[in-house]
Amino acid sequence: MSITPPSAAKTDAKKTDAAKTDERGASGIVHARLANGLEIVVIPDRRTPVVTHMVWYRNGSADDPFGKSGIAHFLEHLMFKGTHEHPQGEFSNLVAELGGQENAFTSYDYTAYFQRIGKEHLPTLMAFEADRMTNLVLSDEVVAPERDVVLEERRMRTENDPSAQLDEAVQAALFPHHPYGTPIIGWGHEIESLGREDALAYYHRFYTPENAVLIVAGDIDAETVVALAKETYGRIPARSDAPQRLRPREPEPRAHRLVSLADEKVEQPTHERVFLVPSYKTARPGEAETLEVLAHVLGGGPSSVLYDALVVDQKIAVNAGAYYMGSALDDTRLWIFATPAPGVELARLDAAIDRQLEAFVAAEVGADDLNRAKTRLVADAVYAQDNQVSLARWYGESLATGLSVEDVAAWPDRIDAVTAADLVAAARKWLDKRRAVTGFLLPKDTAELAA
Amino acid sequence: MSITPPSAAKTDAKKTDAAKTDERGASGIVHARLANGLEIVVIPDRRTPVVTHMVWYRNGSADDPFGKSGIAHFLEHLMFKGTHEHPQGEFSNLVAELGGQENAFTSYDYTAYFQRIGKEHLPTLMAFEADRMTNLVLSDEVVAPERDVVLEERRMRTENDPSAQLDEAVQAALFPHHPYGTPIIGWGHEIESLGREDALAYYHRFYTPENAVLIVAGDIDAETVVALAKETYGRIPARSDAPQRLRPREPEPRAHRLVSLADEKVEQPTHERVFLVPSYKTARPGEAETLEVLAHVLGGGPSSVLYDALVVDQKIAVNAGAYYMGSALDDTRLWIFATPAPGVELARLDAAIDRQLEAFVAAEVGADDLNRAKTRLVADAVYAQDNQVSLARWYGESLATGLSVEDVAAWPDRIDAVTAADLVAAARKWLDKRRAVTGFLLPKDTAELAA
């Protein structure tokens, strides 16, 4: 492991400037907070003279105001439209000229902006990024055409893609109450109504230092980063407390839902089943780690239970797997997915998955299987940390979804503590079919128009 | 018909006191508005010396603030907790002592309070009802125990009733975005968090004269009602414009959803299929009336298409029908439902319903069938109007869901204009399976655990 927990870790850094209250772990990761509320994580990585600079805002599509779905993602687009000081294009052109990379992404729980660049340019990046945290200029002339860009993005992604349409319908069925049921990009008819005033109101609500996490990874020391942050982000006055994220909790699901879509564009039928399960943030201690290992044992590659049964043994599928989306502020999803072998009906594959899950909770998980899964999960995480951007992203995502630097650092130990009995208990509790939505994607001319 | 449209009807009465701007139709129905915004409908009915007095507020469960589901219904309970002038119990005791009846109900789009009483007591009722429109007193001592009453009501209705649980899940699947997907009573975990401040904030937002419709039916003339209304409701100052109802529109559905629930308490399996369709408020002219006739032709009693095919002819069902819930502010539901004959699997019944709908859109509706359906619908409405409470309720519900007095009066003519071609076109457009959620209620020990 390249990360170990700080020896005297505190979860909540105090509201004084960071230089006085640094927390430094054995790995050298520093977690601090500016007086205006901006949280900072510095991750030393000295191999190349490059830095990764990220600002994470604790607002994503699940924080979109009622009836304004898509505004988080739309604002992410608009953040490239320039400020009083730096007109549209100047920031991106500069990054390109300096040989850097930039990107931005919106998810359910956060929106993030990042650049990767030679370390000598970090002060410039921070000045530009701090500038657009507070000085964005939006005119109707830029807002309306960009809304058309987003609508076109939505059309390209979903209107011509039955698989994307099914995914939207499956998520909507899994989360009828919680906003995870609304696509990140928003529903088309609501995007159409988003205007300049909506974007500005959203910007002023969420784009504040109190709501942001600055992550800097690379060949630079923490004192320098914190000093630079004070000179740039530190000049933005604290507005108030961090904005509240108001989200209803999904009620306990009681009835299985099957969502099926048949379309002439479908060439390969697919099967998915999604369960409503706790996230790292909402789970009881150890429960999310158990779900992580469970998904890996069930469907993490060719040696997994489902792959072995459905693809290798029964030969009714050409692929099968599982995935736990643990990083989420609220209750989240565990997916099982499979692609049928030619001529195999989805209903047959579905019944076979049922039988595998029943067999799983009736049997014991072997120590070898369990240890292999745990070792693989931790190893994958270690490999991911060998990439500066992945490592920075792991911290950013964790801090934006309510976890702490210490939670990230202690993750391998918590994975290691999962037992075989935990797996079976978790499968029995959480992989209950009443908690699930099953999705069938079918060719149009199929005889199998599921129920 | 006992109602005919006013000859010079205006949809929006002006904001001056009503006596000057009465609108009176041939039937004597008067539609007026007080200066403070209160809308009034007086429906003369001289047969007995009795009046029905109703106040309809244009807010229902679909207006519950995000994360506060159940507040509309909870406040309806709290409206019986007394005011400064009339402590808890006084109003209800008075109605009982005077030989009257009272009731209150909360729906998706409105909340209403009504009494039926000897006409000489109307002034007293109006004074009491106006008093609680603005002077409600809520202490923690009454709010907390009443919340327990509501939670118990929810437990009794749904926790022990798999059919109610399935209905909740079906509605949630049909409306993943729009609040019609949330039960009127609210989700249990959100009811638990409702407190005095929530109730007062909701009360102050919605319980205003601008947001209310007063309906008085019975043995009284309009001048007297309007004069009484001015003395009572008219003293409440106008607060502002009517509160806005902010509701997201449901996106176009693209994938069929099957919701299935198996429970050991289920003795009789049932089948339902619900389609997302326009309401009287959202439909294009004539479209809602077509859906009304369509539901009747398909499933309005023993001579309907579905009953005839499934129960009489194929004998695979013991009951079958259809229902259009046209009265709604937003896009709404058309139900098809069936109860299988003993030993018939729901999947078989489901496939038979598919075939009937396919046959329906491929054939023509006979003139006799159409005329019988239209005559029956209009006749049923006439019979309903023979009941003072039903008649008052029809006007209240219509005005609370965005329709006008004239819309109600012209309804029989619009039903009469529906053609056989309209029915087939509407079935093809709206009874598309992709717009539907199917619900299967099954016994626990069934072999048929649908998908």
Image: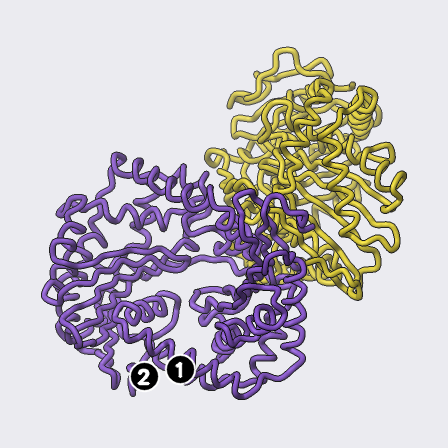
Chain colours: A purple, B yellow
Dot 1 alpha-carbon crowd within 10 angstroms: few under 14, some 14 to 19, many 20 or more: many
Q: Residue at x 27, y 67 (%)?
A: A389
Is residue A95 positioned above or below A352 on the image?
Answer: above
Q: Horizontal and vertical percent for residue A318? A: 55, 63
Q: Are marks 2 and 1 in contact (CB under 8 Å)?
A: yes
Q: Nearer the viewer, residue A292 or B150?
A: A292
In which chain is the residue bearing label 2? A
Q: Is residue A401 above or below residue B60?
A: below
Asked which secondary structure carries label 1, the reply is helix
Q: Which residue is mark 2?
A: A1
Going from N to C along the chain, the mark reached first, 2 or 1, is: 2
The answer to which image quadrant residue A28 occupies is bottom left
Q: Quick check: can you spot residue A12?
A: yes
Image quadrant where residue B373 sits: top right
> Relative to A381, is A207 above or below?
above
Residue furthest to the top = B7
- Residue occupied by mark 1: A412
Q: Is residue B359 above or below residue B372?
A: below
Name which quarter of the figure residue B127 lies in: top right
Amino acid found under the numbered disc labelled 1: Pro
B228 horizontally vs A22: left or right:
right
Query: Left or right: A439 with respect to A20?
Result: right
Q: Position of residue B22 (x, y in %)?
A: 61, 17
Looking at the picture, how far across and down is residue A414, in whole percent?
44, 83
Question: What's the amino acid at mark 2?
Answer: Met
